[in-house]
Amino acid sequence: MDAERTVGAIQWTTRTGGRLEPGERRRLVVDLARVHAVNAVGRFGLLVGLDRGRRAYVAPERLVPPDSPLTRAAAQAAHAALPVTLLNHGYRTYAFGRALGELEQVEVDSELLLAAALLHDVGLALARGREDFTLTSARVARDVAEQAGLSSASTRELLTAITMHHNPRVTRQAGPVAYLLAAGAGADVVGLRCWELPPSVVVDTVGAYPREGFKAYFTRAWANEAGRVPQGRARLMRRYGAFSAAVALAPFDE
């Protein structure tokens, strides 16, 4: 992966501030169309009771958040910066991403995944100016990584997962942390791939980390981000991806 040219990688996001070139924008619109098609088919299966999640199983102990110096530092930073609505979203993102990884047998550093999940949206609450909110999230994550003594390679993995997570489509090529962070966030925000999750995982996760009016809060925050960075990915998703409608239609009550 050429990190300087890969949209969403920490190097690309730092260099560009998250502002897309026309060619990059066109490629992401194609990715959006693919994701919408997959979501439509999967949600129809969920509606008619043909979702594969009904036959799946993930051991509950595999979804317990890990405890380590890194995850404690990430939790402390997240609790200090985030309202409960976004904080709980971070924990749900971890659980859904970890569950999808278990079902696909994707090996992932669970500590990095939890730290990324807790910190990926810090910028939605703190970012100012004209750069992508994930750069603010990444700066907080870098401080957390330094506090925990994380290696340079693991720090880059953590930061790229955060800055890439709101690409319309993140593949395994980006690495397991980025892949599962995006998958978990997509499941919680718009219901993407929720049909693959065992219903018990969804019910137990939302019960443990209530949504607290998440749809309304997140829709407002995303609109603010799109206005702040008019050439960024949030604006693209609102313009071409019917993002507000996708959030409203996610298979959750609020």
Image (spheres, rainbow, N blue to C red):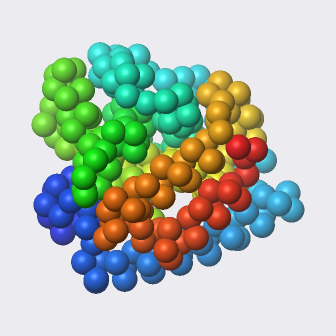
Left or right: 187 in relation to 48: left
Q: Quadrant of residue 171?
A: bottom left
The quadrant in which the N terminus is found is bottom left
Left or right: 190 in relation to 249: left
On the question of residue 56 being in view, the answer is no
Q: Residue at x 29, y 55 (%)?
A: 132
| In the rendered image, the vertical position of residue 169 relative to residue 204, given as above or below | below
Q: Quadrant of residue 110?
A: top left
Q: Residue at x 58, y 70 (%)?
A: 242
| In the rendered image, the vertical position of residue 235 relative to residue 130, given as above or below | below
Percent coordinates x, y for residue 147 in the rendering: 19, 20
Left or right: 4 in relation to 134: left
Q: Residue furthest right?
A: 48
Of residue 93 and residue 131, the one placed in the foreground of this image is 131
| In the rendered image, the vertical position of residue 96 relative to residue 208, given as above or below | below
Percent coordinates x, y for residue 174 in the rendering: 32, 57
On the question of residue 209 being in view, the answer is yes
Q: Residue at x 13, y 60 (%)?
A: 15
| In the rendered image, the vertical position of residue 9 relative to residue 161, given as above or below | below
Q: Quadrant of residue 76?
A: top left
Percent coordinates x, y for residue 59 in the rendering: 64, 29
